[in-house]
Image (cartoon, helix red, strand yellow):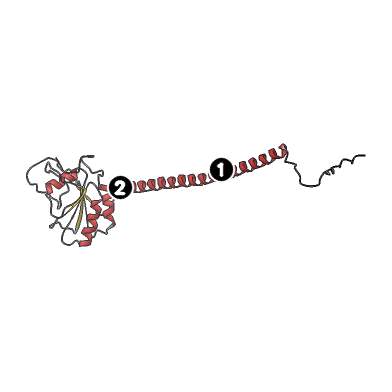
Amino acid sequence: MGSAAKQQPTKQPGKGKSNVRPSTADRRARIAELRAEEQRRDRRNKFIAIGAAAVLLAGMVGGGAWIALDAKQKKDKEAAAAKAPIDGVRTFDNLARNHVTTKVTYPQTPPVGGDHNPVWLNCMGTVYDKPVENENAVHALEHGAVWVTYNAKASADDVSTLSSRVKTTPYSFISPYPDEPGTITLTAWGTQLTVDSAADPRVASFFTKYVQGPQTQEPGASCSTAQ
């Protein structure tokens, strides 16, 4: 008899290395889970971005509202100051407005109005370190300028303070006036105030009320050098 064929051992289920791969359903479930997590992350980021934008927008709106309110309050305050009377202000009526090329004798020192030279002074925040001609200055008053004058009794600090205010105020100018009776005089057309110090709060009130104020004879007229 021939030799019997060798029998190969049969591999029992569950023994040895497994060759089983994840099913298609498992892979799809895992992908769906990852996508869901990504969507949740995207939603969280979107909510955070929307929240930050809302806070920023609220801040901008609030800031804009505050700026608008502050501007309105400032404007209302200036309007009220322009209407309020200023203690010590003197007014003069029936002032002539003829153009003349001769010297004029004015009843006030400095003059508050009247006949004047056809050429006005530059009054766009101009500081003059020497006396100016009355007739040219009066023409600037007619255009709505405030003229600040001072004599030797005014301190250097007073002159510096007043000059700084004038430099930042179009339709105003300042010059020495040695023979004026008061230390410091503020003049607009037909209107005048005398003070002893630049620190007097009426100075600011005078500027607010009379720079291009209701006394202006020629509203909108130039205050730059006449041509």
What's under tag 1, amino acid-wise? Answer: Lys
Q: Which of pointers 2 and 1 indicates the residue nearer the eye?
A: 1
Q: What residue is rendered at 87% in x and 40% in y?
A: 5
Q: Which mark is residue 46?
A: 1
Residue 193 picture location, percent across and down: 22, 53
Q: Quadrant of the N terminus?
A: top right
The residue where tag 2 is placed is 82
Is label 1 in a helix, a strand or a loop?
Answer: helix
Q: Is residue 73 left or right of residue 137?
A: right
Binning the other alpha carbons within 10 Å of mark 1 as few (below 14), some (14 to 19) or many (20 upward) gives: few
Q: Which mark is residue 118?
A: none
Residue 122 picture location, percent across and down: 17, 46
Q: What residue is rendered at 51% in x and 44% in y?
A: 53
Distance, label 2 to label 1, CA atoms, is: 53 Å
53 or 107: nearer the viewer: 53
Residue 34 picture location, percent across and down: 65, 42
Q: Quadrant of the C terminus?
A: top left
Say whether residue 93 is visible: no
Count of numbered circles in the view: 2
What's under tag 2, amino acid-wise? Answer: Ala
Is there CB contact under 8 Å for labels 2 and 1? no
68 or 209: nearer the viewer: 68
First reached walking from the N terminus: tag 2 or tag 1: 1
Q: Is residue 97 left or right of residue 17?
A: left
State the residue lying farthest toward the right: 1
Is label 2 in a helix, a strand or a loop?
Answer: helix
5 or 137: nearer the viewer: 5
Residue 75 picture location, percent across and down: 35, 46
State the residue lying farthest toward the left: 102
> Where 152 falls versus 70 (above or below)?
below
State the residue lying farthest toward the front: 1
Say whether residue 72 is visible: yes
